[in-house]
Amino acid sequence: MFTAWRNESKNRQRLAALSPRLRRLALGWCGEESLADDLAQEALTRALAGLASLKDGAALEGWAFAILANCFRDHCRRQRPADRFDECIDPTLQPADEQLLQQQTVDRVRQAVARLSPARREVLMLVDLEACSYAEVAEILGIPVGTVMSRLSRARQQLKQLMASETRAKTDGRPFMERIK
């Protein structure tokens, strides 16, 4: 009895420590800070409510990510995900012009990621942001490993195309000096 209570208490602490990662992943998926907070909170609430049903404490992280994925899918079914979210950059780290360029790059990447389908965005964020293995992503999302690999490949390819097309559109295909004349 005492051991079970102690394990549950330990798992509660591990869930609390996992909270920033859940929020970051949710932010990557949905693109809106307040919604990411809500999704992470909902996932933590569901995880805490179902903590007693978790049989293997080592699987807690993947289990919590899977709950978050379900919360995100529920949200997507209810309404269209947001297209925009902001990056917090420490202004003391670099000059304003470099900071502006970095923010513009971050914005372009985030806008391109937001244009991916939710399924591709989920896989991309789990692998590239959270460093989950393909097998972990497959388990979290409840899909075959091959599907994870194909979605990730397509997401990266589409992201590359979106970034390239935006760069071409911004430069209008002409050298800089010709554009300012």
Image: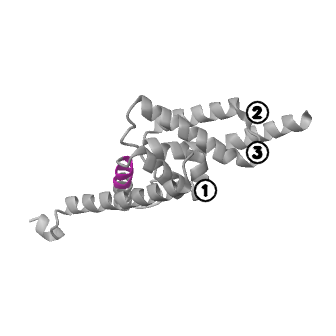
Residue assigned mark 3: 57
Coloured how?
A: one colour
- Amino acid type at circle 3 is Gly
Q: Quadrant of residue 78?
A: top left
- Report, in whole angstroms, how far the alpha carbon at label 3 lies from the one at label 2: 10 Å
Residue drawn at (72%, 44%), measured in percent from left and top?
Answer: 14
Point out the tag, 3 or 2, that comes first from the N-terminus.
Answer: 2
Residue 20: x %, y % from top left: 60, 44
Q: CA distance from mark 1 to mark 2?
A: 25 Å
Magenta-tinted stretch: 108-114
- Disc 1 versus disc 3: distance between alpha carbons? 18 Å
Q: Quadrant of the N terminus?
A: top right
Residue topped by disc 2: 52
Name the residue tied to disc 1: 135
- Find residue 130 and report its image quarter: bottom right
> Magenta stretch: residue 20 in it?
no
Q: Nearer the viewer, mark 1 or mark 2?
A: 1
Q: Which residue is rendered at x = 40% and y = 43% of the image? A: 85
Magenta stretch: includes residue 112 = yes
Please indicate whether residue 4 sits to the left or right of residue 24 in the image: right
Tag 1: residue type? Ala
